[in-house]
Amino acid sequence: MEKVLENLNEMQQKAVLTTEGPVMAIAGAGSGKTSVLTRRIAHLIENLGIPHENILAITFTNKAAQEMKERIGALLKISTRNMWISTFHSMCARILREHSELLGYDKHFQIIDDDDTLQMIKSIMKQANMDIKLINPNQLKTHLLNVKQDPNLIEAYQEPLKEYLRKIYPIYQKKLKENNLMDFEDLLLLTIELLKNYENVRNHFHKMFQYVLVDEFQDTNNVQYNLIKLLVNRNQNVFIVGDEDQSIYAFRGANIQNIKNFSKDYNDVETILLEQNYRSTNTILDAANQIIKGNKNRIKKNLYSTKGDGEKITFFKAYSGRDEVEYVAESIRSLSQNGYGYKDIAVLYRANSMSRLFEEVFMQKQLPYKIYGNTSFFKRKEIKDMVAYLRLIINPHDNYAYMRVVNEPKRGIGAKTVDTLSVHAEEAGISLYDMVNDANNPLKPSPSKKLKAFNALLDLLSSHFDQLDFNQFIDDLLDKTGYFEALKSDDKGDVRYENILELKTMLKESEKTYLEADKRELLMYVLEDIALKSQEEQEEDYEGVALMTLHAAKGLEFKVVFIVGVEQGMFPLYRSLDNAKEIEEERRLMYVGVTRAEELLYFTNAKQRQHYGDLVMHPDSMFIKEIKPELLKLEGLNREREQTSSRYTQEYRQTKTFKAKQSNLKNYKQNDLNKGDKVEHKAFGVGVVVSVVKDQCVIAFSKEHGLKTLMKDHPAIKKL
DNA sequence: CACCGGTTTATTTTT
DNA sequence: TAAACCGGTG
């Protein structure tokens, strides 16, 4: 009993021990909700003797699920591998693998991601002669996925979007099913259909899941809400944790109201407030509280901490976007000299586009950093291509995988040929693969020959698949398809090949994990993992500054946090400015950002910056003004403004740039570099100058580093 | 069918 | 600014 309750405060203990009936824990930022969830599960298993398979826990990300499993495993010294601790989508996939045949899907169904959906939409629009200029496919995708969550929404749309949605929705669904594909929303919707329509299945899961826990409840959408309702049995042992102030995913259907609905839809809900914060100083918490107060209609919370007041919050206003980044970099450098590790520090921005400048400057200054959540590994072209080939091994009739790689690498099968083929296959009601093999297919001899060769290639690969292990198979695939050959003439070929090697490593791992499964079964699970865990595993111990969006920072904490670009128009974004609801979501995002910080918090912005090609000037973010001035320490242009007029600012700017140049001259040895010169770089080794343009040059280093664009006078470069 | 070059358009994103 | 996309040309 002790170890389960160890170090928990009174409210946390109550949340752990109140196991019967519906319970809602309102957990403020940093109030230890993950501990509560893990301890509660531990309590059920260890103290109440509940078998682990009778517990279902749902998290927001795979990472959170993984962490929870690890913590429970460590606490109870048990294997958590088969426990039902997962995301909504993984849980649904697990259920559907057993029962999808009832719904008319083969159990080897494949899961597709948003990019695949976009490709499908493009292809459908083309076939149906829909005007891409009138409605952009990307936009249509976003709205289609929303409509899937709630078909009633379609009525609220304006023409012509409405007509397009009406038209495309049923076709899209039909295509998915024909190709034995499910998108993310299908996983949820089909599970709901299954539970609704099949009493025996429902009873089975009701009997099984005696205790249900849901994390991040404020970010559930309506479909997920309904799914929980269907899963929870009549005992209503359901525990939800959430914080409406941290709901930041409304743009993809999250509904804060679900927290309020919960009290209505379940009987005698016990509400527990977790208000003690274990993360931040009071200065930081006060700022957070002052900001979030601006939102109407929220349950008032009073976060408090015992960590003392700590330092004031620094607010630095730079002259330009670049100056802002320089300031952040310099501050990080001095923090690192004052006992902070690089990985204690995070730079948070509203939009990914902000990351570029930081990356550039950090690289030049040799500050170690790690950008999180950029194009995910599994979204990269070469990986998607490999996955498409693997999908075809499981199901050669998967037309979308077929279309993706039929001319990848180039085999002289162009769009026109594929179009014709699609039309005929559609008419005949068979797959592209079958249409190609069809004796009386109407294609011209030359394309037909090429397509037949492609089919033969697929057959060959498929026959090899059973005899080879995964790694050998990928090599075989690269060879037989000519993919490897094509990489050689691709200027990003090296990186691409490395990514494929990475995929091989992953496949090898899975081979070990699912040892007993049959080969194709195994591949199916691997592809499922790839589809559902779109986020690349991060090296946890990497010693570098974390650069990420505010969204990506949710659930994380850092000793030092920089929130950058705090300007009206950047954060909050332009598009939200005239919409009260969206401003509230932006405010919650700011709240999330602020509450990530444990000890030091910085806001930075720039008086003017380059944005989409032109120079813009933004006023300070409204959220800054919502913080009481006594919590802030003003730096940079902020100071001058207090003291004098704008003329001073002008001078400040001149002295500043002048100073920067001076110091450059003093510290950095001028490199008089010319094309063809040999140089040595601290990190990249010896290289040859390829070109020099103004103060920048392109240098070719050894193969592993390749071409780099660097500042000519950078101290890391030495002319040989 | 592939490639070049002009035009268009810019959130947030896990699953 | 930069990347993605379209349309025309070779």
Image (cartoon, coloured by chain):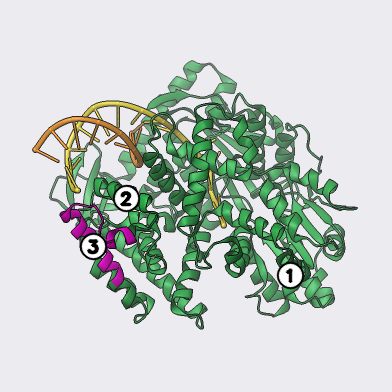
Chain colours: A green, B yellow, C orange
Left-right relation of A150 to A402:
right
Instruction: In this rendered view, identify the residue nearer to me: A563 or A484.
Output: A484
Crowd rating for badge 3 (residues with CA inside 10 Å; few <14, some 14–19, many 20+): some
* The furthest residue to the front: A440
Residue identifier under label 2 = A424
* The furthest residue to the right: A268
Above or below A399: residue A484: below
Badge 1 amino acid:
His
User: In the image, which residues are magenta?
Assistant: A434-459
Left-right relation of B7 to A564:
left
Location of residue A590 by image quarter: top right
Residue identifier under label 1 = A204
Kindly report the distance in space between the C-alpha atoms of the residues bearing marks 2 and 3: 15 Å
Badge 2 amino acid:
His
Badge 3 amino acid:
Lys
Instruction: In this rendered view, identify the residue nearer to me: A439 or A577.
Output: A439
The quarter of the rendered structure image containing the C terminus of chain A is bottom left
Above or below A181: residue A462: below
Instruction: In this rendered view, identify the residue nearer to me: B7 or A27.
Output: B7
Counting residues from the start of the chain, the first of labels 1 and 3 encountered is 1
Whether tag 2 and tag 1 are in contact, CB under 8 A, the answer is no
Crowd rating for badge 1 (residues with CA inside 10 Å; few <14, some 14–19, many 20+): few
**Is disc 2 placed on a helix, strand or loop?**
helix
